[in-house]
Image (tube, helix red, strand yellow):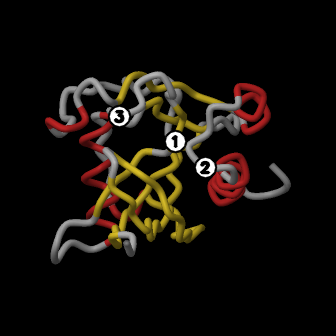
């Protein structure tokens, strides 16, 4: 069976010290396999990538930002994945965002299907996340490094 196409907009918040805010979640059919991933989700019908990124940022973290706050897109990825037993072809566009580590993150605006699935938010360096090993995709550390460069510049 052909995977179902799912366009998504992702936001990678970056601190002034080069850490990235990630979310720990799990597939409800695999609760014993949590993994760290970026903020973001599906693009609604008629919604722009930027609008979807900002909406998902607010839903998943409580953080409000404007279009001018986003950097990028800095990365694009097409990757198959499984969720609740269905195979999708994820077409993801990534934006970066400078964010103060002191910013409060809340899960008060999660969609009903995300409640109990999104478990934690934490700031990570790419090296520390690689050591942890619970990555939603094998190239997540590279994506994090690209986001840090997009926000802070230089050889971060």
Please tell me which residue is depicted at 22% across the width and 28% down the height of the picture: 115
10 to 1, vertically: above or below: above
Mark 3 Cα-neighbour bin, 10 Å: few <14, some 14–19, many ≥20 = few
Give the distance between the C-alpha atoms of the residues marked 1 and 2, in whole angstroms: 8 Å
Give the distance between the C-alpha atoms of the residues marked 1 and 3, in whole angstroms: 17 Å
Residue 147 position in % (x across, y down):
63, 54
Circle 1 sits on which residue?
37
Which tag is nearer the camera, tag 1 or tag 2? 2
Mark 1 Cα-neighbour bin, 10 Å: few <14, some 14–19, many ≥20 = many
Mark positioned earlier in the residue sequence (1 or 3) = 3
Circle 2 sits on which residue?
137
SS assignment at label 2 = loop
Residue 34 position in % (x across, y down):
50, 28
2 with respect to 128 (left or right): left
Please tell me which residue is depicted at 44% across the width and 70% down the height of the picture: 91
Residues at discs 1 and 2 in contact (Cβ within 8 Å): yes
Circle 3 sits on which residue?
29
- Near-viewer residue (109 or 36): 36
Which tag is nearer the camera, tag 3 or tag 2? 3
Label for residue 50? none
């Amino acid at each position: 069976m052909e995977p179902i196409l799912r366009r998504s907009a992702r936001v990678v918040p970056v601190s002034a010290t080069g850490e990235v805010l990630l979310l720990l979640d799990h597939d409800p059919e695999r609760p014993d396999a949590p993994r760290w991933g970026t903020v973001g989700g599906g693009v609604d019908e008629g919604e722009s990538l930027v609008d979807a990124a900002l909406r998902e940022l607010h839903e998943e973290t409580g953080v409000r930002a404007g279009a001018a706050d986003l950097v990028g897109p800095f990365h694009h990825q097409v990757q198959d994945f499984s969720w609740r037993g269905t195979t999708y072809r994820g077409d993801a566009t990534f934006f970066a965002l400078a964010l103060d580590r002191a910013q409060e993150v809340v899960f008060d605006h999660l969609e009903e299907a995300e409640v109990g699935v999104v478990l934690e938010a934490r700031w990570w360096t790419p090296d520390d996340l690689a050591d942890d090993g619970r990555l939603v995709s094998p190239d997540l550390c590279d994506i994090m490094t690209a986001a840090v460069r997009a926000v802070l510049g230089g050889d971060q």
